[in-house]
Image (cartoon, helix red, strand yellow):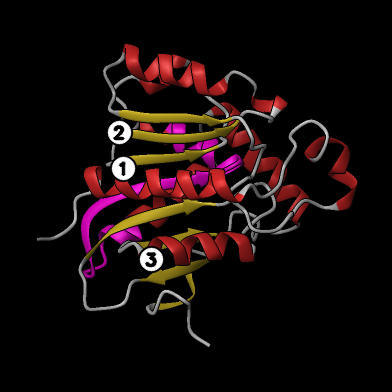
Amino acid sequence: MGPMHGGVSGMTSVGDLPAYRAEPAGDGPWPGLVLVHELFGLDDEMKGHADRLAAMGYLVVAPDLMARGRRVVCLARTMTALQRGRGRAFDDIDGARALLASDPRCTGSIGVIGFCMGGGFALLLAGRPGWDVAVANYGVVPDAEALDGACPVVASYGGRDRYLSGSAGRLESALADRGVPHDVKEYPAAGHAFLNVTHTAPWFLAPVTRFVMHAGAEPESARDAWARIEAFLATHLHRPT
């Protein structure tokens, strides 16, 4: 069965990593998006987000950063890269960007969208060359200096997420101080991972995900966040005319 957005989706690869690719319906070319998944990997939730973005008219590639060996080792290496701001995970994400840039069905305008852990990567990448827009969903905010010269940023946070308490305000201030076009919003009724349809965290993390992050779907907040993301991308990730 094909994707609900009417286009084409399925597995591909970025170097030696498996990746999910979601293509809009029609002939293209389309702007590209690299999707960086949350802590738990490239699961059905993340593929669903990729399909949703394809329905908006974007060619999406989502590399599986947890696929190079044992998952716990991949997770440790990926989180270390995020903390240090360098490492193989950044190379893998840049490989996905290069794959889109070389695709004749891509216009050459490419953004990055991340969820949870991926949101942290998106914010760090916003201040680096090669990206036209960054979409950060409940991502850790880096040091303000990392946002010097950043591309336009749209970001969403849950007000009930105590793990990222105050993040929306810090990000808003850092972007405003630097004159970066942005749209940052915190949703009082939402917690972490509120754009997901299902709760994906393993049971043994429940004390953190449910009682600190208050993770889980919040449909009304999610509808508004997706509408903001769609409008921001339409403005800042140029489509062909």
Identify the mark nearer the N-term, 2 or 3.
3
**Crowd around label 3: few <14 · some 14–19 · many ≥20 (10 Å):** many
Question: Residue 77 vs residue 167: left or right?
Answer: right
Three-letter code, disc 2: Pro
Three-letter code, disc 3: Ala
Rendered image: mark on residue 232: 1
Tell me the mark number nearer the camera, choosing from 1 and 2. 1
SS at circle 2: loop
Position in image of residue 76 (x %, y %): 72, 41
Position in image of residue 198 (x %, y %): 70, 58
- Above-or-below relation of 145 to 103: above
Which residue is most to the left?
241
Which residue is painted at 69% across and 30% down in the image?
160
Bounds of the magenta span? 98-124
- Name the residue that disc number 3 marks: 54
How far is disc 3 from disc 1 in space, using C-alphas? Answer: 15 Å
CB-based contact (under 8 Å), mark 3 and mark 1: no
- Name the residue that disc number 2 marks: 152
CB-based contact (under 8 Å), mark 1 and mark 2: yes
Q: Nearer the viewer, residue 15 or 233?
A: 233
